[in-house]
Structures are given as structure tokens and as C-alpha cells.
Amino acid sequence: MAEVLPYGRQTIEDDDVAAVAEALRADFLTTGPRVEAFERAFAETVGARHAVACSSGTAALHLAMLALGVGPGDVVIAPAITFAATANCARYQGAEVVFADVDAETGLMTPETLEEALSRLGGRRLAAVLPVHLAGNTVDLPAIRRLAEPAPLVEDACHALGTTMRFGNLTEQVGDGRHGALACFSFHPVKTITTGEGGMVTTPDAALADRLRLFRSHGIVRDPALFETPRAAPEPWAYEMQALGFNYRLPDVLCALGISQLAKLGRFAARRRALAFDYWRLLARYAPLVKAVAPPPHCDPALHLFTVLIDFETLGLDRGAVMGALAAKGVGSQVHYIPVHRHPYYRSRYGEIALPGAEAYYARCLSLPLYPAMADSDPERVIEALAAVLGL
Ligand SMILES: Cc1ncc(COP(=O)(O)O)c(C=O)c1O
């Protein structure tokens, strides 16, 4: 049987391994010079003023909530189609989540679905809106921002490193801080670049960047100039814990991998675009029963996931059985995502919520293999297998 294609996979090359080995032999395994170097390189790559590295995309989202001072009595709005962490980060802080519906064809929050979610705030303070750039496709940021104001946007950009956008005459990059107060990235292995576990927050705001750094490391301050308690004599050992923070640091060793991977972002993104282009071409003849999710017109995505929408109902097929049959042909697939409000935790907190766009997207979505190391011939192999399994 041919090699099994997973739906996503990291690309680790010899120079990545060498970079990690070099860091392992150096003086710092935890916080060292590679942390700042990774942050600087990342900020430059996405056009952000500040970038703060942390231990995961989930930590990035939680740090964003901490930096904004989100807390009990507050509400955030997050879309129903995402990974649970987008909503959970607000719950960590005791805030509540209003789930916005999504466009049934893209899975993205839209100005219309945000407006509807805003009508469900019930007089509570809106602390942030968390649009998700699902699969690498971005929401209409200017319109979403106008509706959210004065609440800030926290972009969940975990899928969208390398995506560019065009609004008016401006070409923008995800994470450049033109619309969002904060943008959160993940370096989990199936993402566009990886550090194993890892994350990054970008922001245009120096004060928010300081707060991200404070909460990343226990709320501890080491600079005597910033101490709240005056000291009569120097205390070389002194530090102050000024807020309740966490250990969300990303070690030097993983930053070494991040720096090495980031240098390949252009190549990785181009490969993802080329593979997606082949998929789009091959899938055209199967519409409307099988359709690739089309990127919004403002967006040139470096896709993290290649998602197809399959009309299982009309085909009279069960998605689990289709996934099993694909796996038997060596094609991995996955479902992104079970609507978050459907999970028992959120169902018991907020009850049943009718979000028809999310249901329609969820009922049809399937992620097919997409990662840089796929062979040129793989998209054809995948679509042939899919057509055979679907009887098309
Ligand atoms: C949309 C989205 N948000 C947040 C996360 C959390 O990232 P991490 O797994 O790095 O904690 C993920 C990762 O899977 C994700 O896909």
C-alpha cells in the first residue's frame, strides 16, 4: 500500500536539528538569547511592532486575556467553529463567552454573525472579540473591528501565519497589528512552522507587550527601576511579584527551532499555496457535492488546513465511514471543528444555542492532507481516492 498521508505534518530538516543541537550545547536551556532573537525575527516577518514568545497558542490566548485585564463580569465573543482554546482563554479569567455563528461556506465569523452575537450580550461589558482566521483564511478585519469598537480584537491567528490580505490599497500581513490589539499564533507541529509546543503574541502596543511579558513569567519584575517597594540599600537578589502570572515561557532550545523554521516560512507557505492550487483545480468538477472552501476575496492564504465541504446528506454517506475508507486508501483526514458550544462543558454552562451556520459548516467539513513535504502527485492521489470513496 502507498504511504499514508496524514492531514498535517511538521517539516523538520537537518539545519533545524543542527540549530537545536547548537542551543543544547549553549549556556541557556530556558530563557536565553534565542528567545529575544526569535521574537525580533517574528515581529519583522509579520510586520509587528512587538512579539512575545510563549509556551503554546493556548498560552498566547490566555496571555492576551491577562494583558487586557479580562475578568469576571466580562464577556468575550468567539466563533463557534474553532479549537476550544479560543473560548477557554476567557473562561480561565472568569469571563463568559458569547459564541458567534459563522459563515456556512467558510467557517469564518462575519460582520453579520458578529452583529447578531453583539445582540446577545445582555448588558454585560464586552472585553474583547476573538475572530479566528480559520484554516488560514482571514475574517474581514476592518469591518469586524468597526463593529467591535471600543472592545479590542484579539485575533486567533494560530492557523494563519504567512497569510496576506488586501483591504483597499493596503497589503497587510496577519499579525501586523493594523486591526487587532493582539494576535496569537501557535507553533504546534501541524501549523505552518513548529517549535513542538510554542506560541507567540504580536501587538502594536508597547504597554500590552510589557504586560504579556509580566504575565508570561509569574508576574515577576526584576528591574529595580520598576519596583513598587523602595529599598534603602541595593539588594542584588531582589525581585518583586507584582501580579499573579504563570510560567508560559518558551525555552531557548525551542526558540532555536523557531528561528530556523521561521527562515523557511516563505518556502513552506509557497508550497502550501501550490498544493492548494492543485486541489482547487482537481476539485472543480465535483461541485456542488464536494467543494473546496474558497478563500475570501480579501485574502491570499498560506493555508494551514485544506478543507472540503462534502454534501454527505445528498450523497447518503456517513462521514466516519468515509474517513475510514479514505484511511484504508492511505489518506488521512480530520474534522475541524466540532462547534465549541456543543461540548458538554459549554452546553452545561450556556445551554443549547442555535447557530445554523456553524452546524451547516460542521456537517460538511473534512480536512484533507496538506503539508510542505507532500509530493507533487499527492493532491491527485487524494482527490482520486476521495472521488472513489464518495462514488463520484
Ligand atoms: C484555532 C486555534 N486556536 C488555538 C490553538 C491552541 O494552540 P496550541 O495547541 O499551541 O495551544 C489551536 C491549536 O491547535 C488552534 O488551532
Image (tube, helix red, strand yellow):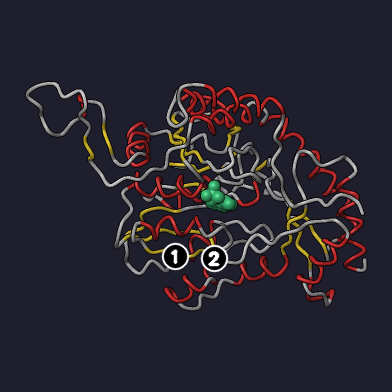
Q: Position of residue 274 (x, y in %)?
A: 80, 38
Query: Which amino acid type is shown beneath numbered disc 2?
Result: Val
Determine the image quadrant of residue 1: bottom right
Q: Image point 25% across, 26% down: which residue? A: 223
User: Closest to the observer: 224 or 52?
Assistant: 224
Q: Is residue 157 left or right of residue 362?
A: left
Q: Secondary structure at mark 1?
A: strand
Q: Residue under label 1, please give it.
A: 98
- Amino acid carrying label 1: it is Val
The reply, left or right, for residue 349 in relation to residue 282 is left
**Label 2 sits on residue:** 340
Q: Where does the C terminus fall, quadrant-wise? A: bottom right
**Residue 291 visible to the viewer:** yes
- Give the percent coordinates (x, y) of residue 289: 83, 66
Is residue 75 positioned above or below 12 on the image?
below
Q: Is residue 4 left or right of residue 173?
A: right
Label 2, secondary structure: give it. Answer: helix
Q: At which x and y percent is residue 372?
A: 76, 38
- Residue name at image x 82 percent, y 49 percent: 280
Q: For residue 90, what is the image quadrant?
A: bottom left
